[in-house]
Image (spheres, rainbow, N blue to C red):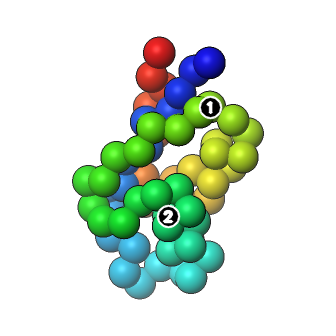
Amino acid sequence: MAQLKITQVKSRIGSKQNHRETLRSLGLRRINDVVVKDDRPEIRGMANTVRHLVTVEEVD
């Protein structure tokens, strides 16, 4: 199964509470944190919600 590498590139300070909670549920705590998650619609939706704070790469 394909995986997604999600990296937080911007601070969550000043963002909406929903966005902060989404980052936390993805497992991201601070800038430059990286998590690798399975490529599922739920994860893609969460990454799309905070797309201005993270970068997403596909990993084989």
In which quarter of the view is residue 19 placed? bottom right
Where residue 13 appears, as percent x and y from the top left, is 37, 81
Name the element at disc 1: loop
Q: Amino acid at mark 2?
A: Leu
> Label 1: few (<14), some or many (≥20) within 10 Å?
some
User: How far across and down, in percent of the image, does residue 49 sit?
Assistant: 62, 59
Q: Nearer the viewer, residue 47 or 52?
A: 47
User: For this rendering, which residue is in front, 25 or 13?
Assistant: 25
Q: Which residue is mark 1?
A: 39
Q: Describe residue 45's horizontal placement relative to residue 16 as left or right.
A: right
- Residue 29 lies, in percent from the top left, at 36, 66
45 lies left or right of 57 = right
Residue farthest along the right direction in this orientation? 41
Residue 54, numbered circle? none
| Separation (CA) of disc 1 from disc 2 | 16 Å
Using the image as rendered, state which of residue 10 and residue 40 is in the foreground. 40
Where disc 2 sits, the SS reads helix
* Residue 55 in sight from this viewpoint: no
